[in-house]
Amino acid sequence: MAEPIRALCDELIKAVNVMMEAESSQTYRLEALKFIEEFKEKSPFCVECGLQLAEKSQTAVVRHFGLQILEHVVKFKWNDMAPQEKLQLKNCTMGLLSGGTHPILQEECHVKDALSRIVVEMIKREWPQHWPDILMCPQEACVLRVNGVILPSQRGTKSLSQTFTLNIKLPFFSLQAKAHWRVGVATLNTLAGYIDWVALVYITNDNCHLLEILCLLLSEPELQLEAAECLLIAISRKGKLEERKPFMVLFDEVAMNYILSAAQSSGGIVERRYTFLKRLCQVLCALGSQICSLVGSDFEVQVPLNLDKYMEALFAFTTHPSQLLRSSTQMTWGNLFRHDILSKDTVVGQMAIKYLRAARISLVKTGFPSKNDCPGCEFSRVDFDSDEDFNCSFNSFRAQQGEAVRLACKIVPFEAFQIAREWVQYQICTPIDTGNTTCEYSKTEKGLCSALSLTAVQWDAMTFFTESVLGQLFKILEKEKIPIDEGMELLQMVVNYETRDPLILSCVLTIISTLFPFVTHQPHFLPQVLFKAPRTRAVKNLRRHACSSIIRICRDYSDFMLPCFDMMYEHVKKLFSSELLLTQMEKCALMEALILISNQFKDYNKQKAFLKELMAPVTAQWLSEEMKSVLLDPATFLAYVGADQVISDADTEDQMGINRSRISFCVNTILGVVKRARWPANPEEAKAGGFVVSTISDGAPIYRNPCAEPLQALLPNLFALIRTQNNLFLPENINRLSKTFTRVYEIMDVEKNFALGIPQPLLDAYDSSAYRNIAERMQGFFSSLYDNCYHMLGNAGPCMQQDFYAIEGLAEQIVGSAFTHLDSVPDHRLRPLQLVMSCPHDYYDSLLNPLLGPLFTYLLQVTLTSYTISGSMCAQEEDEAYEENHVTQEVVEEQLLRLVTREVMDLLSKLPLYEEMVSMESSQGIQMNTPSDELSELGKCLLQSEDIYMTLLTICFNSLSWKDTINCQRCASVLCWTLLKQVLGCNLLPDAVTWLYTSVLKGLQMHGQHEGCNAALTQLALLIYESLRPRYSELRFIMNQIPDIHVEALEQFDQKTIQSTVSKAGEKKKREQFKRLIAGTVGKPLGQQFKKEVHIRNLPSLFKKPKPTRDILENTDTPFEA
């Protein structure tokens, strides 16, 4: 026997060496792997070979492989082994543990890890019933920690906890001797595994003596990392508040001094030291969560005396050069500043001021891993793979810090304003440092700042800080307490600041908008502010920013701007008189600003006359014969915009650009009117101004919009343009595109990156549009035009109300335009129609039924077809090698399909199918609108049309098995039962019932591994089974086909369901029973589908002394009482 085993071991050693050698070919590696796997699965000599290979005479790699064989035997063959074989393997393993390895400080870590795994796997199957003495020896107990996991089995929790309590002090005697630090590290690693799961009472025993020892070890360089990990695991434990109350002992003088000293100690970028700082930072954040939970609770926990030292320690990480450490503390600061009791403490108020001053440094975007301009760069190279990763992390950090700054401003508003004021003044007085603007991806002109220039990032940080502070200041301070004089002085300084740098000017615009509320107290300063907006044709993003600033001011302060309307209108007219002064975008923005102010006229006739006058040039151009011919015919349209022309030279002047700008200007202007023109929000003012036409049956007013009449004349050409755009995707029109513009209908890079979750490029060249070639400009024109047309159509209903819905033949016009050739329109062009939500009840039959019928039919068709194609492509990928760009395109299309179907579900979920009833939230006294069981008018309308209703039902139940968990959960929890319960009383076809129930089970197979989806689908399946099983035996037939179903349990459940004998008190038990019955339908995650299952048999039950029942006690006491 020994000779065959020796020969087999030699072959195994050769196979392992072939797999591990770098020079081995792929073919040899695969053959070696196949031989090894067949050996582990089929050979009867696994134990003998494993023990021989694990001997100390072998190399570390071979020994590790031998131990892996033994682990495989325990995991997958233990149940088939005889008791004598199990005992022999246990004894051999313990022999390896005691004498089969090199000294513990010399042994390879992976060998010790492999041996520990074997012991743990055996303990899972044998302890405590068949192996009660395993924990009696500390040597064996210390190996039980494997990768942070200690005995996942819950069988021996109590015994392990007792062992842990008895021996907890044993390892710490050796920690005092420096020579034994490696033993101390191993001990702390083992301890970390226990702390993760033992009861909190064992951790907090003896007034948290264990935690105090761990705090003491934070000062020991050799042990501080492991001690911090133990502390982190302990303090992060969840549980009852009363059990966590002892954690407050860490705020005692001694413990907090050690923590503070460790946090403030300096150290370079040494990996172990830096990892320790990360763990200690996490410890402080976890401690912050504990104090926020305990202070102010019912357990009378007071604000700790050493809160200042805790905050100093946390502040040390907030000001650390490492971006990762800074960002880790922000949520804790937010919790402290938000806390009802802690935020009122003097110490927290003083720290809030320090925090705000520190934000002036931390908000500046520096520390990129590719640079060396600050100490944080070295840390960033450890934490981030690229500048893009750093940029994404920094943006998230800035959002969190902005929230913390706003909360700190609530605590110390005046100090926050002064800090912001000082920062603005400092930046204005500091000379501009453009830095190096000649980097490889910078397109900035010489002498101007790039996005990463020192001055630019400082201005950007200061602007963000000022916005956060002042935005909060005006909300929390009474009008009399606002520092108006200082604010106006600051605004005057900003307005007087002169620079030609686009990035700095953009920040100036933002600060002016932020400081604008001060102008409301001194109106004479208004013209100077308005005319500050720069008009520089060369920098498009800056112009866009200036336009949005004007619109924002006119939107938020339209009543204040009303006295300046005439002056502003006359100034705009002068600007409009010259084509060279304004771009089309600026014209549209100024018109929107004027419309926003005109909403304050509160006079229907005056506002209508103004809108007619304002829109007259656009109306004339839009309704001209030339424009009509262009909008009606796809070929003429392509020729008009220049998409059929071949451009050989990229520098050739775009002759047709003026035509595209005319179309865009008309569309954007109409969209601006539709979005901005409104009647007064106050019903009395609206009635007095002539905006109310009549009232509906419940007394609610019917309004008219002063822009309705001018817009009605423009709608036919809008429908023509939408129809023409859909026709552009037909093959004959695609062939009309020149070779220069063959890709203009493809998805934009911005949309593609959004679908793939790819962040925007790190350096966004501020005038990116100026550098785009003509093909990209054409692509952007088609994309924005398509979007804006559907925005107009979607906003026309809420804007024009009955004046829009009463248009004769509106449904036919929409179907004939927006629904034309939808089969040819790519997924990334599909847009939702927001007409349903604002449609009056009177137009449901005339408008919604003709629209929703073909719309839902198309959506059902496109989702079924697309997901079928997507599934076939996934299957095809297994057989064919796809190039990278093809794979990327497939991922983009699949993700776009998800986005489209989510928009479909958004539309369905927002449909008001049921009447809403007002309910009162008892705990908070808040009124809430909840749907009732009574159908709304829209619900009745849709239910009357069998085709629409069945299409809706089919879409919802089909979506349960789409490859989208978000859609699945939404449909299962909201839509499916809502629609189905309306027809439960009808005579449904057995095939329909079978399909409905099977669709839910398919959803469980696809998404059942996700907890949220599983709960929603299980509840839906139970509702269907309870409601329809008494009438349809087909459901029982489906249940019988579920894999591994318990027939007797199904029979009992089925009888109870038919007889409806379950009380409300047993609902939870019934759900659990049903969940166990259909467990066989739940699919496995992809990563688990091909994994070999490990089966661990239950050990015999431990003897438990039966407890006397209460009835026996009562009966026993009765005679004595008598």
Image: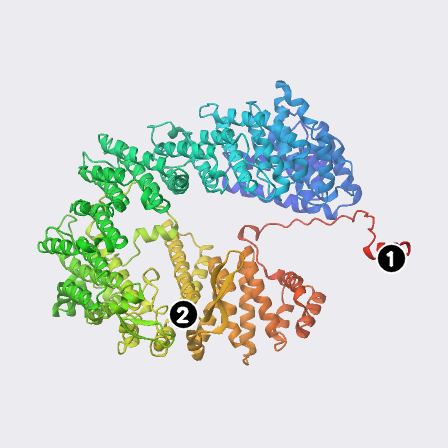
Percent across and percent down for residue 848 are 36, 74
Query: To which quarter of the image does residue 359 belong?
Result: top left
Residue 117 vs residue 900, the one in the foreground = 900
- From this view, report whether residue 9 is shown above or below residue 855: above
Query: Would residue 696 be found to the left or right of residue 1105 on screen?
Result: left
Q: Nearer the viewer, residue 543 or 559?
A: 559
Residue 339 showing in the rendered view: yes
Quadrant assignment for the N terminus = top right
Badge 2 element: helix
Given the image, on which type of amino acid does mark 1 rest?
A: Asn
Position of 496 relative to 719 (above/below): above
Query: Which structural element holds mark 1?
Result: helix
- From the image, tell me which residue sits under label 2: 861
Camera-near label (2 vs 1) is: 1
The quarter in which the C terminus is drawn is bottom right
Residue under the image location 48 percent in, 41 percent down: 335
Q: Which mark is residue 1115?
A: 1
- Residue 147: x and y, percent? 60, 37
First-in-chain label (2 vs 1): 2
- On screen, residue 174 versus residue 1020, left or right, reads right
